[in-house]
C-alpha cells in the first residue's frame, strides 16, 4: 500500500470531502509501514474496506416549529465499521454537519473505539439542525422526527448512538423516548441517557476527565507533575468544563476558556467558584464567555483563540482545526510542553508537524478524548446487566482504560530516539485490532 496513491484515489472517488480526506491522510501516513508488513492485508484489499464506510444512511427530517411552520433538515448516519462490535458513535446537531464531516468522524471513531479495548465498532451521525435558540418543544419535535427514520437502522446489538455537539441529555432523552414508542422495547439503544433510565455516572464528565488522565500519563513519561502547571483550555461546553474541573482537582491552573465569539484569559486561574459560574452561564443561561470577563474583570479577546497566551500545557476542547500552523508556532515559542486533544481533530496537519518537530508531548484526539466513548461503552455494559455501577467504579474503569490506551500508544509509537509519536502509536494500535478482526471474518 502506498499511502499517497491511496489518498489520491480516494480524492477522485470522493471529491469535495476535505474533512474526510484529511482524516484518512493522517491515518494512512502513519500505518503504511505496519500495513506493508502484512501482505495478506493487501491481498484482501483491506485498505479500501477500512477507509470506505459500510453504509451511509441519509434522510429528510420534517418537523413543525412553534409558529406552525413546517421545517426540513437533513439527517445522516454513517456506519463505518463493525468488525469488533456494534456500531458506536455520537449524533451531532449543528449547521456544519455534512456527509464529509460525518465520514471523517466515523472513520476516526472506528480506531478510537478499538483503542478503548471495548467491543465497539465505529459510526457517526447527525443533522444540520441547530438546537440553539429553539424551544424545548421544538427540540422534542425535531428529535422525534429524526428518530422516526433512524430507529430502523439502530439497536443495542446493531448500532448504539450517543450525544455529540448539540446533543446532550435533553436530546438523547427525547430520541430514546421516541425509539421506545416505535419499537415497544426498553433497551440500551442510546448512551448518554439520564440516570433515571439507564444512564451512567461519570458520562458527562468522561471526555474531559479522560483527557486529563491521559495528559498525566504523558507527563509521567518525562517525570513531570501536572500540579501547578498553567493550562490553556479552549471551548466552554461539556468537554472544556469537565477538563477544567479535573485540572482544578489535581492542582493545575486553567487560565483560558473560549466560545465562537472569542476567549477569556484569567491570570489568577479559573477556580471552582468561577467554574460554577461558567457552568450556569453556558448550561442554563446559554450565555457567552465574554460575560465571564465582565464579571471577573479579566482579559477578553473577541474573534480569537487562546493559543497566543503563555502557559505550560494546551488542551484544545472546542472543535476541529482550531489550532493552525501559526497557533502551533506560538504555543512552541511560549514554552508549551504538552498538547492533548479533548476535541476531535482540533489540530491541522501542519500544526501537528510543528509539535512533533519540537518534540512536544502531543496526543491526538482518538487517544486522548476516548474517555467519552469508553464510558458510553461502560453504559452499554451496565444496560446489558440491568445494573448501575457507582461513581467510583466507573471512574476507576475510566482511569484504567485511559492508562491502557496510553500504554498501547507507547508500545507502537516509541521511536529509536525515545520520542513517543502518539499519533503513530494510536493509529497503529487501533488499526491492527480492527484489521485482524476483519481478516478473521472473511470478505464481507
Image (cartoon, rainbow, N blue to C red):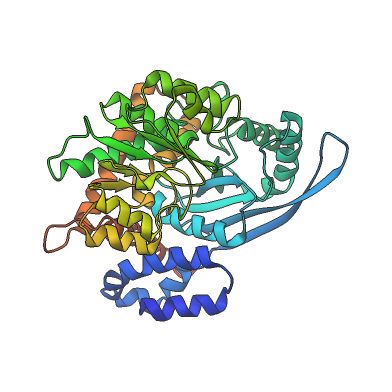
Quarter in which the N terminus is drawn = bottom left
Q: Is residue 71 left or right of residue 120?
A: right
Place of residue 399 in the rendered image (x, y in percent of width and height, measured from the top left): 29, 34
Image quadrant assignment for residue 217: top left
Q: Is residue 378 visible?
A: no
Q: Please name the residue shown 56% across and 30% down the image.
A: 193
Residue 198 horizontal/vertical position (percent): 54, 27
Q: Quadrant of residue 309?
A: top left
User: How many marks are shown on the rendered structure?
Assistant: 0
Residue drawn at x 38%, y 50% as measured from the top left:
365
Give the vertical position of 403 relative to 279 (above or below): below
- Horizontally, residue 290 falls left or right of residue 84, namely right
* Residue at the right extreme, as displayed: 68
Q: Nearer the viewer, residue 409 or 136?
A: 136
Q: Is residue 63 left or right of residue 334?
A: right
Image vertical order of residue 172 relative to residue 443, above or below:
above
Residue plotted at (26% across, 47% down): 338
Residue 315 percent coordinates (x, y) = 35, 43
* Horizontal relation, residue 217 to residue 185: left or right: left
- Residue 106 visible? The answer is yes
Viewer-proximal residue among 12 and 307: 307
Q: Nearer the viewer, residue 298 or 191?
A: 298
Residue 87's x, y, as percent? 52, 51
Which residue occupies 47% across, 29% down? 293
Amino acid at each position: 500500500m502506498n499511502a499517497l496513491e491511496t489518498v489520491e484515489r480516494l480524492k477522485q472517488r470522493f471529491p469535495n470531502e476535505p474533512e474526510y480526506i484529511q482524516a484518512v491522510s493522517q491515518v494512512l501516513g502513519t500505518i503504511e509501514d505496519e500495513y506493508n508488513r502484512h501482505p495478506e492485508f493487501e491481498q484482501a484489499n483491506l485498505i479500501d474496506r477500512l477507509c470506505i464506510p459500510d453504509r451511509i444512511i441519509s434522510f429528510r427530517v420534517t418537523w413543525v416549529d412553534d409558529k406552525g411552520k413546517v421545517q426540513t433538515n437533513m439527517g445522516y448516519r454513517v456506519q463505518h465499521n463493525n468488525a469488533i462490535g456494534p456500531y458506536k458513535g455520537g449524533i451531532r446537531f449543528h449547521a456544519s454537519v455534512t456527509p464529509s464531516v460525518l465520514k471523517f468522524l466515523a472513520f476516526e471513531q472506528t480506531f478510537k473505539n478499538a483503542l478503548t479495548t471495548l467491543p465497539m465498532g465505529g459510526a457517526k451521525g447527525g443533522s444540520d439542525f441547530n438546537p440553539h435558540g429553539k424551544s424545548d418543544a421544538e427540540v422534542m419535535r425535531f428529535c422525534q422526527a429524526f428518530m422516526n427514520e433512524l430507529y430502523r437502522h439502530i439497536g443495542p446489538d446493531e448500532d448504539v448512538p450517543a450525544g455529540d455537539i448539540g446533543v446532550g441529555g435533553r436530546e438523547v432523552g427525547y430520541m430514546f423516548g421516541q425509539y421506545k414508542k416505535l419499537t415497544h422495547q426498553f433497551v440500551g439503544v442510546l448512551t448518554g441517557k439520564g440516570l433515571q433510565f439507564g444512564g451512567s455516572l461519570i458520562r458527562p464528565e468522561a471526555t474531559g476527565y479522560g483527557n486529563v488522565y491521559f495528559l498525566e500519563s504523558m507527563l509521567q513519561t518525562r517525570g513531570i507533575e501536572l500540579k501547578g502547571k498553567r493550562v490553556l483550555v479552549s471551548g466552554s461546553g461539556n468537554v472544556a468544563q469537565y477538563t477544567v474541573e479535573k485540572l482544578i482537582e489535581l492542582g493545575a491552573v486553567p487560565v483560558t476558556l473560549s466560545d465562537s465569539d472569542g476567549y477569556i484569559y484569567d491570570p489568577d486561574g479559573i477556580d471552582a467558584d468561577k467554574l460554577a459560574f461558567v457552568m450556569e452561564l453556558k448550561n442554563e443561561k446559554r450565555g457567552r464567555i465574554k460575560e465571564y470577563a465582565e464579571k471577573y474583570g479579566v482579559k477578553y479577546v473577541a474573534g480569537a483563540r487562546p493559543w497566543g497566551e503563555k502557559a505550560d500545557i494546551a488542551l484544545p476542547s472546542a472543535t476541529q482545526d482550531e489550532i493552525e500552523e501559526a497557533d502551533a508556532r506560538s504555543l512552541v515559542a511560549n514554552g508549551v510542553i504538552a498538547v492533548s486533544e479533548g476535541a476531535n481533530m482540533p489540530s491541522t496537519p501542519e500544526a501537528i508537524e510543528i509539535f512533533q518537530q519540537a518534540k512536544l508531548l502531543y496526543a491526538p484526539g482518538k487517544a486522548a478524548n476516548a474517555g467519552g466513548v469508553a464510558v458510553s461503552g461502560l453504559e452499554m455494559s451496565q444496560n446489558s446487566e440491568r445494573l448501575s455501577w457507582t461513581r467510583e467504579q466507573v471512574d476507576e474503569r475510566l482511569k484504567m482504560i485511559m492508562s491502557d490506551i496510553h500504554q498501547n500508544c507507547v508500545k507502537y509509537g516509541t521511536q529509536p530516539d525515545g520520542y513517543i509519536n502518539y499519533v503513530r502509536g494510536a493509529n497503529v494500535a487501533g488499526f491492527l485490532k480492527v484489521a485482524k478482526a476483519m481478516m478473521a471474518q472473511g470478505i464481507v
